[in-house]
Image (cartoon, rainbow, N blue to C red):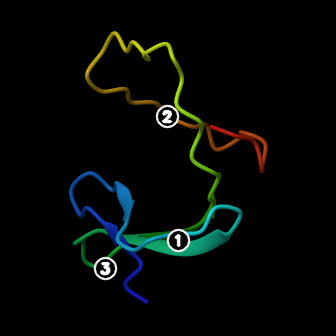
Amino acid sequence: DEKFSIDPKTGMVSSKKMVTAGSSDILTIKAEDSGSPPLWSTVKLHVDWIPKPVPSQVSLLFTQKYYNFSISETTAVAQPV
């Protein structure tokens, strides 16, 4: 439904439409290489939309411009990351 986009280089998933707090989405994502024959895999991404937090009097301070992390395939299902 064109609600999401995926950057083909980074794999970053972005929402392109307004969402409602308390709702959720399940995306099935397929990645495929350009080999012959091509190798591919699929994964389900569950997104729970939470309410926007109330603004804090104290500003958030991040020490790095970007944060990257990996999630092990053995990580328990339904855990926040």
Q: Residue at x 78, y 50 (%)?
A: 78
Q: Earlier in the sequence, mark 3 or mark 1?
A: 3
Q: Between marks 3 and 1, how big is the CA–CA gap?
A: 16 Å
Viewer-nearest residue: 63 or 34? 63
Observer-side mark, 3 or 1, equals: 1
Crowding at mark 3 (Cα within 10 Å: few <14, some 14-19, many 20+): few
Quarter-wise, where is residue 67 in the image?
top left
Going from N to C along the chain, the mark reached first, 2 or 3, is 3
Name the spot of residue 19 as percent of width and height, x first. Answer: 52, 69
Residue 18 sits above or below residue 11 on the image = below
Query: Can you tell which mark lies on residue 72?
Result: none
Q: Earlier in the sequence, mark 2 or mark 1?
A: 1
Front in this rendered view, residue 42 or 18: 18
Q: Which residue is mark 2?
A: 70
How far is mark 2 from mark 1, CA to CA? 17 Å
Left or right of 65, for residue 71: right
Q: Which residue is mark 3?
A: 37
Q: Secondary structure at mark 3?
A: loop
The residue indicated by pointer 1 is 42
Q: Position of residue 22 (x, y in %)?
A: 71, 63
Type of the residue with mark 2: Ser
Name the residue type under label 1: Thr
Q: Residue at x 59, y 68 (%)?
A: 20
